[in-house]
Every structure is written in C-alpha cells, then in structure tokens.
Image (cartoon, grey):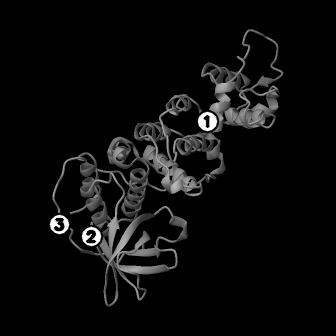
Amino acid sequence: MFGLGNLKRKLNKLGYPEQQRAERLPAAKLAAHCDTDINHVDAGVKDISSTGLYLVTEKRFATGEVVHLTLHAEGSGEDHSELEIAVEARVARLGQDGIGLSFVLPAGLDTNLWSVLVRNTVFLTQASEIAHMFRTLRTILFLCRLCQSGAEESIMLLGGHLDPPRLECLFEIAFAAEKLLAELPNGDKMRADPNLIAHILRESSWAHSVQQKQLWIGLFVNSCKVEAWDDSNIAFADILINVTPAQAVILIVGCTRALESMQDSDTTPPHRVILSPTEISELTRMYDLTRVATDVAYLYNLGILDRLYDFTSYVETENFDITPNSQGIELFRRTRHGLTYEIAEHEPIKTAVIEA
C-alpha cells in the first residue's frame, strides 16, 4: 500500500541507494500540458512510471525533442493552480495513439524518492492527500532546480519535521518565491546557497501575518542569483526571525517612507519618519500605546531603527519616530520584492499529516 508514510520514510533515507523497477502505472486521474517553442498540447496520461509517461494525443513531436511538461490532477480546476507540477521531459517514442516521454529530472533529485512520489500521485484517493502530494512534488522540484545536489536539507523539512501549519506556510513561501523568480530575467538560471535556503524555509515557516510572509518571500528571492550567490542573507534572516506581525508593519512603513526621499546609493534617509499616535495605532491595529512603544524599542534593539523610544518621560506620547537606520534600509532593500506578491487573506488549504 502506498501512502504518505512512504514519503516520510523516503525523505529520511535520502542518499541510500535502492534499486526499483520503473513499473508503468495507469494514470487516468492525471492530465498533462506540453509546451515547446511552436506547440502547445493538452493531453490525458495513459500510464506513468518513475522514468516517464505516455500521453494520449494526436499531436506529434520529434523524437529527442525536449518539452516543458505540466502535470495536474483531473478536475483540480483553476482555483487549485498550486496543485500541479512542472518538469522537463524528452520525447522517447511515438505511438499509434500518442507519445512516450522520459523525464529530465533536475540535478540532486533522489530517484528513489521521485519513484515513491510518482506512485503516490496515482494511488492516493483522498483529496487532501492528493493535494499534499502535488504540493510536495512541486516544492521538491523547485528546490532541486534551485539548489541542485544541495537541496537535501530543505527537502528533509517536508518529511515530518514541521507541524501542518508550518508546512502550509513553507509551501506558501516557496510557491510565491518560485512565481516571482519566474518573472525575473534569467529566473530559470538562478541558483542559491543550499544552507541559506534551508534556513530561510525553516524559520519563515513560523510567519503568521501577510507582512511577515512578504518579507521572507523577498529575502528568499533576493538570495537567488545567476552567479556568485552566497549566504550573506543569513544575518538578515536572523533579524527577521525576531520580527513580530506588528513590528513587520512598522518596518515596512518606516522604510517605504524613508526610501521615498532617498537615492539608490543612499544608506540613510535625509528626513525623519514620524507617525502620530493615531496613525501608528491604525497602522498596527494596537491601541495600547505602551505596547506600540515597546515594539518600536524592540526594532531599535534589533538594530534596524535609528532612535530608541524614550520611556523615561511621563508626558503623553505625541509622536513615534520609526526612521530606519542603514541596516534597516539594507534589510528592506533585500526583502521589498516580496511586497509585490499579493497574499490573499483566506482559510489555508488543509495539509495532510504525514504518518510515520
């Protein structure tokens, strides 16, 4: 029997070779879309194995041609666009009723793990398990393309190391980063430091608010480069770990307003960023000004705001200075691309628990 428990066992056995036959399995529940420079084909999947699949289609491709293949569960619909996976494939043979494709897997993807994941897409029957499997597959493929042979530490996070809410958050951040990278020039050629990506995914999975997630998404994207990638963002990740939802809002607003009066080469803003008590209460949705002042002071102690809030005065607070310092500006410059990603406020998709 094939279930999510198999996934956990495989994830925890990465690096231990194991021989398996590439058994062909009927895959009526799967559908595919193929793209080349000149052809775009929707087709049903007749059968699938760990090495390839057979598509039922009248369209013909040249043997040896590489296609961009997208697989999704039949009936998943437009509202579940996350529940699809993309992988390169090569045309292996032409049949009477279709074409046979062999997978071109990214470097670093454990073939035994891939085999179990492929089988689970066929054998699982519960909607939540199928959704979980597709999301897991998509994340693993993305991480292997990005980190190649170094993706193991990040992949291990999917094997039961995180509880369901944190795993849901990891999926959300990984998918957002994947989408933003795809929109960048040479995004498909970008790579990242494997340890840094694992660190970002592990710590960002604690994020609760939209703003926290956007900052983490931005840091993830900023960590990816076509060449000369490094782990310099670890220091900024260690700052973000300690930023609460309210503090994330204060940081974003303070840096956004500061940058409005700065040149790209500037490291500190020429003007102070001052908010009234009413403005900062509406911004943070906190009306206890002592709590707000504590958050402002905490951001100063994290080393990203320029001035410490004065708790020594008994006079009623007239304003809050949320001007970022040079480190705060640099942190924001490295994360602000994530603010372009719109995160809907909705009930999260249920994530199946991987049983041991």
For discs 2 and 1, the disc positioned in front in the rendered view: 2
- Please state, as top left, top right, bottom left or bottom right, where the N terminus lies in the image: bottom left
Question: Label 3's element?
Answer: loop
Whether tag 2 and tag 1 are in contact, CB under 8 A, the answer is no
Horizontal side, residue 49 vs residue 241: left or right: left
Amino acid on which disc 3 is placed: Arg
On the image, which quarter does residue 131 sit in? bottom left
Residue 35 seen in the current view: yes
Q: Earlier in the sequence, mark 1 or mark 3?
A: 3
Q: Nearer the viewer, residue 250 or 261?
A: 261
Between discs 2 and 3, the one toward the N terminus: 3
The amino acid type found where label 2 is placed reads Ser
Q: In the displayed structure, does residue 302 sit left or right of residue 111?
A: right
Confirm or deny contact between disc 2 and disc 3 (CB under 8 A): no
**Callout in the foreground (1, 3):** 3
C-alpha gap between disc 2 and disc 1:
45 Å
The residues bearing labels 2 and 3 have C-alpha atoms spaced at a distance of 9 Å
* Within-10-Å neighbours for mark 1: few <14, some 14–19, many 20+: some
Label 1 residue SS: helix
Picture coordinates of residue 50 (x, y %)?
A: 27, 66
In the rendered structure, which disc, 2 or 1, sits on the residue that comes first in sequence?
2
Residue of label 1: 245
What residue does disc 3 label?
21
241 relative to 49, above or below: above
Pointer 1 with pointer 3, Cβ within 8 A: no
Say which residue appears at 36% left-offset and 72% top-offset: 90
Res 247 visible = no
Tell me how far mark 1 sits from mark 3, CA to CA: 49 Å
